[in-house]
Structure formats: C-alpha cells, structure tokens
C-alpha cells in the first residue's frame, strides 16, 4: 500500500502545482500586481519622498479654503449592499487576454487607443459586461448608475496599466464606451501630454495612488503617495497635466498639489495598518488628483477592510494637520556625478530583453522611456553613482539610436549607441544613475519601433 500512497501524494502535489499555475495565468481582481512594488520606477512622482520638501508660502490659505477643521475620509472599503461597493476595483490580466476597442465619447482626442508594441484596445474581461464589481461603484458595465465608473486594468506580463473613465458596455451597439482612457507603461515615468486628461481629471494614473489592503497590512512601510480629492480646484501644477477648474478663488488648490501630514502629528495610538497609512502621508503625502468631496482619500475595494477602524481613525485627521508643499516641487537632478572612484566587477548582464518579460527582461525597449533599478543587481552597491556598461542592440529593424539617462532626469541625454538596419551593434559607455539615491537608470528609445537591447555591467563609480 505504501507505493500506492506515494503515487497518490505525487499526483496530488502535481495537481496542486497545475492549479496554482492555472490561477496565476488567469484574470484576478484585487490581486496579482507585477513586482517590484510600488508601481512605477522609484523616482516616479507617486513614489517621491517629500518629507523634506519645502512648504508652499500659500499653504495656510489653501488649507483654510478647504476648511481647517474638515475631517479626512477613507474612500474605500468592502461591499456597500447589493452590487454597490466602496473603493476602486483593479484587475490584473495575462498577456493572452483579448483586447477590446474602446469608443471614446467625451475626450477622444486626449485618449489612448493602443499601448506601444501591443494590439489596439484595452484588455477587458468579457465578464465585466454583465457581472458586478468589476468597475468602480459596483454595478455591471451594461448599466448606467452614474458616477465616475473608473476601470483599472493591468497587463501583468507586459507591465502595462490601462485606465478608463465613465466605462460602459453598450449592448445595443455591441461595443465598449468610455469618457476617456489612458495607458501607462509601468517601467517608465512618461507624463501625459500637457493639457491632456487621463482617466482622472489631473491626467495622472489612478492605481499607483490607491491605498491597498495588502500594503497596509504588510511588513514594510507603504512607499507611495495617495490619491485624494477636494471639492474645488483651480488650475494644475506638475505632475498633473490637465485643468478641471471648479473655482476662481486663488486659494483653491490646483490639481497636482501635494498635501503632507505634519511630522508633529502623533500617530502612535492607532492600529498598525492605520499607522502605516498615516506614516505614508508624512513621507510621501497625498496628490490632489480629481474634484470630489474634500479630504477624501481613495483606496482599493477589498472586503477585508474594516471601516469600523478606518472611519474613526481618518476622522481624527483634519485639514489643518496637513501642509501643502511647494506647488510643482520636484527634486532637481544633477547633471554630473563629480569626481568618483572606479570599481570593477565581474561582467554581468543587467538587462536582456530577449528573456521572459520582467523588470530586467522583455519586452524589447519600446518607443519612449524604460527605467530599471540598477543598484542591488549584478553586485552594484546602493552607493553607486554611475556605471561602466556595454550596450548591445540585436538585429534592429531600422536605423536609430538609444540614449541613457539618470532615472530621475528627463531623457535628454546624447546617444549612447547608434545602429543600422539588421546589424547587431555594441558600444561601451559610462552612464549616470539617479541622483536621488534610488539607483535608477533610464533608457530612451526615440525611434518608432522596439529595440532588442542588452546591457552588461563591468564596473561602477562611487
């Protein structure tokens, strides 16, 4: 009987492994975000440490216009009864998910139809047409209950975020409709074109600014800012790109403004998950991303949230507990690393886009920018300021060039490698890393086609 038992156990283990693999390849709601987290590169505006950023000279007036005593509210939670839900739903899908074209009925000239290197459309599961809890608010897409009806989708294999506003399945015309839509590669920091909206009024991505259950109850600090709304806004500042003014008062905050919980605010008496949320408000702050109820902080839909804990804790915070940091603030990247010492390392491949998709693998470098965290890889220490690399382009489909830049700077560096059609070409270069200390390295492809790219490191400067 023992051999039979061993065979049975082997079959069970194999079955569980197959089931696990199958689940990982399927559509998931509220789970399955691709690593590394937080979303977007470390120097993205959602992930900037603003704890030392200067306070705006008009901060007190901004806060008083909101209302110094206005309490904060967690705009997230679980089920609200029937099909209704609290918070934003996010969906992760595999690369095999079928793409659906979108008819944009409000901001078509400011919406994205296709992600670079991917088929046109958005990867929307067919279940969302008639089933509840796939879209913000809860009711199925074939109903029109009102509200913003945001839909957030992540292609976790290709590392692309798709976001829609006013999402609706028009069964009569057999098509998906939306007010606007925006597509964000997760490995870049590209901002929306100036004056363009996204699925949000400010022109920003929504998902990276949500308070998520997994990080609130995680073992490490939350490492990004949160999305918030105010009733009245006026104009916009970086990182926002779009104006949705609702007040002519000069003390109405602009979209893109950042609020920061004062360091002096005592948060020690709250539950651990609330402390993590409040500490992130001190370190990364909140970004005014849309018009809505004053001091509402957006989070993810999750039935595990306990609003009996969240609501009274958030009520303890009022607008006067916050500063508005200097409007449009962002760290100024250096253009030179200064005199440095050079250290050799065993040659190591930092990036090979022929490999499986991931932060250091595929896809090929798409048009635009791609940013990866170099420190911590290939023996590169966190103290490294620049790298000695060999860059290779494999069998390009046309002539072009690649540029390398610090991960917290604009991609305006000169070419590091020029190449011709069909010829594999390599070149040595010294490339600067982010001056913020994040260790991020940027690659800019100014061409209209993808480029198969290898980056080998053989030394660093510090």
Image: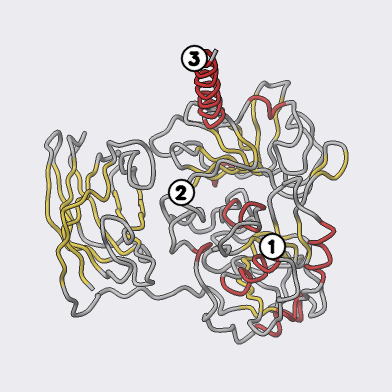
User: Label 2: few (<14), some or many (≥20) within 10 Å?
Assistant: many
Mark 3 residue element: helix
Identified at 51% across, 63% down, the residue is 47
Residue extending furthest front? 1
Residue 272's x, y, as percent?
69, 65
Residue labelled with disc 1? 273
Name the foreground residue: 416 vs 13: 13
Mark 1 residue element: helix
Identified at 64% across, 60% down, the residue is 227
Mark 2 residue element: loop
User: Label 3: few (<14), some or many (≥20) within 10 Å?
Assistant: few
Quadrant in which the N terminus is drawn? top right
Question: Viewed as shown, does residue 316 lie left or right of 234?
Answer: right
**Dot in front, 3 or 1:** 3
Residue 220's x, y, as percent?
56, 62
Q: Earlier in the sequence, mark 2 or mark 1?
A: 2
The numbered mark at residue 305 is none
The answer to whether 4 is drawn above or below residue 156 in the figure is above
Q: Earlier in the sequence, mark 3 or mark 1?
A: 3
Residue 174's x, y, as percent?
67, 21
Give how far apart the Cα atoms at labels 2 and 1 are: 26 Å
Identified at 42% across, 33% down, the residue is 118
Displayed quadrant of residue 180: top right
The numbered mark at residue 186 is 2
Query: Is disc 2 in contact with disc 1, using a CB cutoff of under 8 Å?
Result: no
The numbered mark at residue 3 is 3
């Amino acid at each position: 009987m023992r051999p039979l038992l061993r065979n049975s156990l082997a079959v069970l283990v194999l079955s569980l492994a197959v089931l696990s693999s199958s689940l990982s390849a399927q559509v998931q709601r509220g789970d399955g975000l691709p690593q590394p987290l937080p979303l977007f590169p470390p120097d993205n505006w959602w992930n900037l440490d603003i704890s030392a950023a200067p306070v705006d000279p008009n901060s007190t007036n901004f806060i008083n216009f909101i209302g110094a005593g206005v309490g904060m509210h967690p705009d997230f939670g679980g089920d609200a009864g029937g099909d209704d839900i609290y918070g934003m739903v996010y969906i992760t899908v595999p690369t095999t998910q079928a793409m659906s074209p979108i008819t944009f009925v409000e901001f078509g000239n400011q919406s994205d139809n296709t992600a670079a290197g991917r088929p046109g459309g958005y990867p929307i599961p067919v279940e969302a047409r008639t089933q509840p809890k796939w879209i913000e608010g809860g009711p199925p897409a074939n109903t029109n209950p009102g509200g913003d009806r945001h839909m957030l989708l992540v292609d976790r294999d290709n590392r692309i975020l798709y976001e829609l506003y006013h999402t609706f399945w028009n069964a009569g015309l057999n098509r998906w409709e939306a007010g606007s839509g925006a597509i964000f590669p997760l490995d870049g920091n590209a901002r929306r074109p100036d004056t363009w909206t996204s699925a949000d009024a400010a022109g920003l991505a929504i998902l990276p600014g949500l308070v998520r259950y997994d990080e609130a109850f995680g073992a490490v600090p939350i490492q990004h800012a949160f999305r918030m709304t105010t009733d009245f806004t006026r104009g916009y500042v970086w990182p926002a790109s779009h104006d949705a003014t609702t007040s002519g008062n000069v003390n109405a905050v602009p979209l893109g403004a950042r609020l920061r919980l004062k360091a002096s605010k005592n948060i020690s008496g709250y539950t651990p998950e609330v402390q993590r949320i409040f500490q992130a408000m001190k370190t990364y702050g909140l970004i005014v991303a849309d018009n809505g109820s004053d001091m509402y902080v957006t989070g993810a839909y999750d039935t595990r949230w306990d609003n009996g804990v969240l609501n009274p804790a958030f009520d303890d915070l009022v607008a006067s507990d916050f500063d508005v940091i200097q409007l449009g603030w962002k760290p100024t990247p250096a253009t030179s690393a200064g005199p440095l010492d050079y250290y050799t390392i065993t040659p190591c491949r930092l990036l090979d886009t022929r490999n499986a998709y991931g932060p250091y693998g595929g896809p090929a470098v798409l048009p635009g920018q791609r940013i990866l965290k170099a420190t911590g890889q290939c023996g590169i220490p966190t103290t490294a300021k620049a790298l000695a690399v060999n860059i290779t382009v494999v069998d390009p489909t046309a002539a072009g060039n690649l540029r390398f830049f610090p991960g917290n700077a604009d991609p305006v560096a000169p070419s590091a490698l020029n190449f011709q059609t069909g010829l594999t070409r390599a070149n040595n270069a010294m490339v600067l890393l982010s001056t913020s200390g994040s260790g991020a390295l940027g690659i800019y492809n100014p061409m209209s086609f993808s480029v198969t790219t290898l980056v080998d490191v053989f030394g660093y400067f510090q």
